[in-house]
Amino acid sequence: MKLYGEAMPAPNPRRVRMFLAEKGVALPEIQVSLRKGEHKSAEHRARNSLGQVPTLELDDGTCISETISICRYLEALHPAPPLFGRTPLEHAHIDMWVRRVEFQIMTPVGMFWRHAHPLTAALLTQYKEFGESNRALYARGIAWLDRELNGRDWVAGDAYTIADIALLTTVDFATFTGLDLPEDASNVAAWRARASARPSAGA
């Protein structure tokens, strides 16, 4: 197997690298430069028709894209430690939190990045007023999350899971784009410090 990805600060390839690090699994990663547009090349589109990273290529040439799908496949191959839960209830609960992170936190970050950041201005038509409006949506999502994290160490409960990986890569990327954590989000800040202290955070 080999992974097609991109270096920091790209959040989605980092998700898979962090997941692999938590599993103690090493895979070769082939860099696909987003700034050079290599992800839109015919060669890469043959692996992922949407021209995105990461993409996992299996030994028989089969390709899997989308970070959660890649991580689910890797979880099936390497079940310990379990990052998607052990029981049906844990599976559902963790899935719920991944979706919440993606919709409530990652969506406004992505829209701000696409429509308000100078690095993306040359790549697409920006609607800057809409882009800037996502600052408030991100802050609102973080405020909600801060309340949810009160009294627990990790996003989906007592154990570190794929939901924490999804959130850390998103919050760190948000900071890169210029969306800082609100100063009063103390629970999120404490969670971020715990998550960032894990060796996998450097992946």
Image: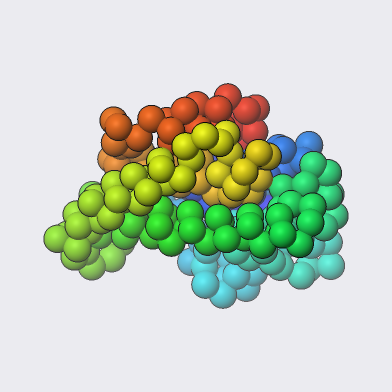
x%, y% of residue 43? Answer: 60, 68
Residue 167, position as x, y percentages in the image = 50, 46
Q: Nearer the viewer, residue 32 or 108?
A: 108
Q: Residue at x 54, y 49 (%)?
A: 166
Q: Is residue 106 left or right of residue 124?
A: right
* Residue 89, image quadrant: bottom right
Give the side of residue 137 with respect to residue 13, left or right.
left
For this orientation, the residue located farthest to the front is 151
Q: Is residue 183 left or right of residue 38?
A: left
The answer to whether residue 161 of the structure is visible from this angle is yes
**x%, y% of residue 3?**
68, 53
Q: Within the image, what quadrant is residue 9 found in?
A: top left
**Count of numbered circles in the view:** 0
Q: Quadrant of residue 122?
A: bottom left
Front in this rendered view, residue 51 or 90: 90
In terms of depth relative to the viewer, which is nearer, 132 or 195?
195
Q: Residue at x 52, y 72 (%)?
A: 50
Which quadrant of the rendered structure holds the C terminus?
top right
- Residue shown at the point (23%, 67%) measured from the top left: 125
Please say if 203 is above or below 135. Answer: above
Residue drawn at x 30%, y 32% is 184
Q: Is residue 128 toward the left or the right of residue 52 in the image? A: left
